Amino acid sequence: MTSRGAGTAFSRKNYRLSTEPEKSKVTGRVLYMPCEKGALWVQGVAEGRLGPSTVVLDHTSGFEGLLLVDDDLLGVIGHSNFGSIRATTCVYKGKWIYEVLISSQGLMQIGWCTLNCRFNQEEGVGDTPDSYAYDGNRVRKWNVTTTNYGKEGKLVEKDTSMWQLQGEPTVLITLAHIFNYFSPLMCKVYLVEDVLMTFLLSILERGGAVEAHPLIQQLLDLMWLLMEEYEVHECLKQLLMSLLRAYRFSPIIPDLGLQIHYLRLTIAVLKHEKSRKYLLSNVLFDVLRSVVFFYIKSPLRVEEAGLQELIPTTWWPNRFTKEGKESKEVKEESAEERLRRRAYERGCQRLKKRIEVVEGLQVQILKLLLNNKDRGGGEASRYIFLNKFRKFLQENASNRGNLAVLCPPEYMVCFLHRLIAALRYFWDGHKVKTPASLSSEEAYVPPQLFYNGKVDYFDLQRLGGLLSHLKKTLKDDLAAKANILIDPAELQAVTMDDLDEDEESATSAAQRPSAALAIGGALARPAWLSSPTLGRANRFLSTAAVSLMNPRRPLGALEKIKVLTLRAEQRTREDIEGTHGNDGLLLGKPPEEPDQPITENSLLEVLDGIVMMYNLSVHQQLGKMVGVSDDVNEYAMALKDTEEKISRCPKRRRDIHEELLKSQKVFSEKLNHLSRRLAWINVTIYSKEKMQDIYWLLRVCIRTIEHGDRTGSLFAFMPEFYLSVAMNSYSALKNYFSPVNSMEELPGYEETLMRLAAILAKHFADSRIVGTDIRDSLMQALASYVCYPHSLRAVERIPEEQRISMMKNLLAPYEQRPWAQTNWILVRLWRGCGFGYRYTRLPHLLKTKPEDASLPSLQKPCPSTLLQRHMAELLRSDRDLAPSFLNSVLNQLNWAFSEFIGMIQEIQQAAERLERNFVDSRQLKVCATCFDLSVSLLRVLEMTVTLAPEIFLDWNRPSSELLLRRLAQLLNQVLNRVTAERNLFDRVVNLRLPGLESVDHYPILVAVTGILVRLLVDTDVQG
C-alpha cells in the first residue's frame, strides 16, 4: 500500500521504519488487516498461497519511505512523501480478498503487486506495470495509467483484473466463507433444482415487480465474484435447465401461477447482464430449446386447467347446414342461447386475462435478450441474440426432414407472436428517439439485404434462381444500381459448382412437382433444392468479397474498397449497425430506395427472421389447429340432427328414443369439452391480437415486395419465401381466424387487399421469377383470389394498366407455359355469364355432401364484366394475339378430350371383364381431370365467341375461316362421343364409379350448346 497526506494517529504503541533521512512529516494513517477468503489468519497450508498463517505487514524489507508500524504489525502511518509497504503473504492461484480500514484523510493507493515491483519516492503500488491499486479518495483505479472507477468510501475488491466495489466487509467475509464451501455443490443439478431454485423462488413469492427484489441481482454478483468461472457457468446452466423443465412440465392450473412464477425467476436471472450474456452465448440456443419459454401449452384435459371453473357455461354456434356450408339465413337468437353465449364469452375473457399475464412475461424475456444498451463490456445482448437466432433459423430450414432437430411448430407460433411484440416495442421506441425514421406500422425489409451478403439465407431459393448464377448474370446491374462489385476471384471459385449444377438441373427438372399447393397451403420443398452443390452456390454471397464505390459519379481504380462479408457468428455491432463510412446491413442502397431512415439495422434482421420463421412452420401449424373448430361444427350438426330425430321419434318406440337420448348425451359432453378447449385455442392462437400480428406481417411482406420490385432486375435476389408468406398469411387471415375475428374489421383492409391483388396480377407471369413452384403458387393464388367477390373486386380496383397487362398474360399461348391454372382463372371470370353456367355445383351432385364446402371451386359465381371487357379489347385490337391464343386453346381441347376418351375406353374394358378387377383410383382421378379440363376449355371458347365473335365470323380476318373450321370439327367430335345413346360415354357415366362423380352429360353439353347458340345469334347479326 502507498500513502501520502496528513492524518491523525491511533493511540496505540508503534515504532518507526525508515529508508532515508528523516524529512518533514506529512502523515497518513491506515489500519491494515489482511485476510484469506474472509479469515484474519490461516491455519494449515492453503493452495495458491505462500506465507505465514497470520498475515501481517512486512517491516523487514517490503517497505519504502518513512513509516510508523504498530507493534502487532497490522497498522501503519506514513511520514514520508510517498511511502509504500507490503504484507508478508503471496498468493498465486484462486481468489483472495483482504480488508482495509482507513482511519484518516489523504491520498492512499491500496492494491496488489508482484515481487518484481521496486517502489521509490515517486512510484508506489499501481504506478508500475506489475501492480494494481485503487484510490478511494480520488475515486480512481491505477495500473500505470489511471481511470475513474468506483465510489468513495467503499470496500475495494479485485476479481481477476477487474476492481469492484462491494458491500460491508463483515458481510463479504462471511459470504466468502459460504461460497468457499458451497461453490462445488452449486454445480450439482439436483441441488440447483431443489435448493437454489427453491430459494430464489421464495424471494419472488413476496410479490411485486421483479425489480423490487434486488437480492437476486446481488446474489448473482457475488457468484461471479466469489466463485470460479467454470462453477458459475455450470450453476447458471443447471439453473436455466431446471427452470425450463419446471415451466414445461408443471401442470396447468386455473391462474397459471406456476408458469408465472418460473417466468418471473427467469426474468430476474436474465436481468443480470453478465449472466444474460453468458446464457445467450452458450446455453439458451446451444444447450436448451429456449423457445419453450415462449410456449403456452394446451391442457391435455379440460379438468387439468380448471377450465370448468373459468368457463362454467359452454356455447357453440349453429350456423352450418347439413351440407357443411355456412347458413346465409340470419336466424333469430333465442333468449336462452343469448345468455349462454354471453356467459361463454365472459368465461373466455377471464381466461384471456390470465394468459395475457404469461404472454407479457414472455415478451419481457425477449426484451431483455434484444437489449442493445448493456453497460458492461463486449457485445450487447441483441447482437449475440441475432447470431444465435440466425443459426436457429438455419437449423430449422436445413433439417426439414429431421424431426429431432426441428423446433416443434406449436412452439414456433408462440415464439413468433412474442418476437413480433418485442420487435415492435423497440422499433417504435427508436421512432420516438428518431422522429424521421419509420414507425412499426410502416415497417419493411429493404431490398439491399437480399444481395449485399450481410444476411445469410442459407440454401433458400431466390426468385431468380441460384445465387451464384444471379451474381454472374446481374453483376453489371449490381455495379450500376447498388455500387457493388463482385471479386472476379470469387466468381471463378464458383464456376465449377455452377457447371455441376447445370448438369444436375437437366436431370432433375423432370422430378419437380408440376404444381404447388393452392393458396392457404404451405409450399412444398422439392428434394432437389437441398443438393450440396446448390447449398455451396447459395452460400456464395456469404463469403463473397464486395467492393463499395461512391455513388453518383464514375468509378476510379482508387475508389474501390474491398469489404469481406463475415459469417453470422463473426459479426460485430459495427458489421450490423454500421459506422461512419460503413452502412452495415444497408450496404448497396439502390437509387429507387428513399433516403428516409427506416430503423436500427439490427431490428431489420430480426424482422427478416420473423418472416422466414412464419414460412418454415408457423403457417402449417395455424392450419392444423383449425381442426378443433371443424370438430365443434361436426358435433354441433350431429347434435342438432339427433335432437330433430328425438322430436320426430314416435312415443311407442321407447327403445329408439333411449338410444337417441344416449347419443344426445354423448354429443353434448363432447361439445362441452371441445368448446372449452376451443376457447383456449382461440385465446392463445386465434385471438384478435394474434390476428393483428399476422396482418402486420402480411403488410410487411407487401411493402417489402413493392420496394424490391422497384429495383428492376435486382428483384430476382429476393428469397422466394417473401412471396409465399404474403400469400399464406392472407389465406390464414381469411380461412383460419374467421369467424372468431373478421378480417374486414382490420384497419386498411381494402387497401391491403388491393395491393396484394396487384402483386399477384403482376408477378404470376414475371420473367424475373424462374422457380416453377413459386410461379405455380402465384398462379393458384390468383385463381383463388378471383373466386371470391370481395377479392375479385380488389383485382378490379388495381390500376387499369396492370389489369390489361394481367389479361394479356392470361391470353398468352398455352404451349409456352403451364396453362391449366390460367384457363381456370378465365373460366372463373366467365362463370355466371355462360349458357347454363350459373350453378355452384353440378345439378346431379346437389344431393351429395361436398368434402369441403369452402373450396374455391364451390363458391357462387361472381363474373367480372370489367376484366371481360379488357379481354375483348385485347382480342379485337391485337390481330396476332387472338389466333395464337385460340389455336393453343383448340390444341389443348383436342388433347384433353382425346385423353379422356382413351381412358374411359380402358375403364369400360376393365368393367366388362368377368374376373373381379378394380380400376386404379389414380386412373379415375386423371380421367375426371381430363374431363374437367375439356369442359373448362369449352367454356373459354364460349367466352371468346361471346365477347369477340368477329374473330370467328369476320371474313376480313385471315384466320377467321380456319379458326371456325377447327372449332366446328372439335364440337362435332365432342357431340359424336357424348350424345349417342348407349355409347361408351353413356355406359361409363351409368357405372357411377367413385372418383368420376363430375363426369356427366350436362356440363359438357351445355358448354357446347352455349358456343353454338352464340355463333348462330352472332351470325344473324353479322348477316
Image (spheres, grey):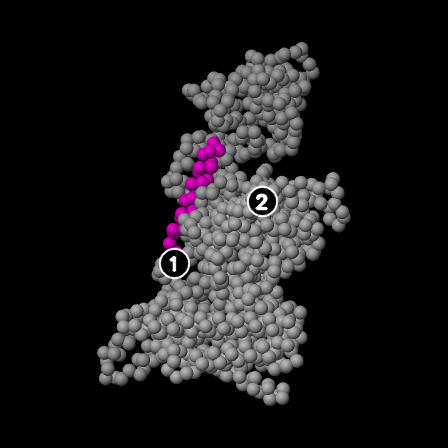
In the displayed structure, 356 sits above or below 920; it is above
In the displayed structure, 473 sits above or below 970; it is above
Magenta segment boundaries in residue numbering: 228-253
Residue 604 place in picture, x, y as percent:
60, 52
Q: Quadrant of the C terminus?
A: bottom right
Mark 2: which secondary structure? helix
Q: At 64% across and 71% down in the image, what residue appears?
A: 880
Q: Would you say residue 317 is visible in this rendering?
A: no
Residue 486 place in picture, x, y as percent:
65, 45
On screen, residue 563 versus residue 313, left or right, reads right
In the displayed structure, 543 sits above or below 844; it is above
Q: At 50% across and 73% down in the image, what residue appears?
A: 893
Crowding at dot 2, Cα within 10 Å, few <14 / some 14-19 / many 20+, comes out as some
Q: Main secondary structure of the magenta part?
A: helix
Number of disc labels = 2
Mark 1 lies on residue: 299
Name the one closer to the observer, 970 or 515: 970
Residue 852 place in picture, x, y as percent:
43, 71
Query: How far apart, in angstroms, are the residues tagged by discs 2 and 1?
Result: 55 Å
On screen, residue 999 versus residue 764, left or right, reads left
On screen, residue 143 versus residue 743, left or right, reads right
Q: Would you say residue 965 is visible in this rendering?
A: yes
Q: Nearer the viewer, mark 2 or mark 1?
A: 2
Query: In the image, what residue type sits under mark 1?
Result: Pro
Q: Is residue 251 magenta?
A: yes
In the displayed structure, 897 sits above or below 618; it is below
Residue 564 place in picture, x, y as percent:
62, 41
Give the numbered dot on residue 495.
2
Name the one closer to the observer, 989 or 142: 989
Find residue 181 and report its image quarter. top left
Which circle's residue, 2 or 1, is located before the other in the chain? 1
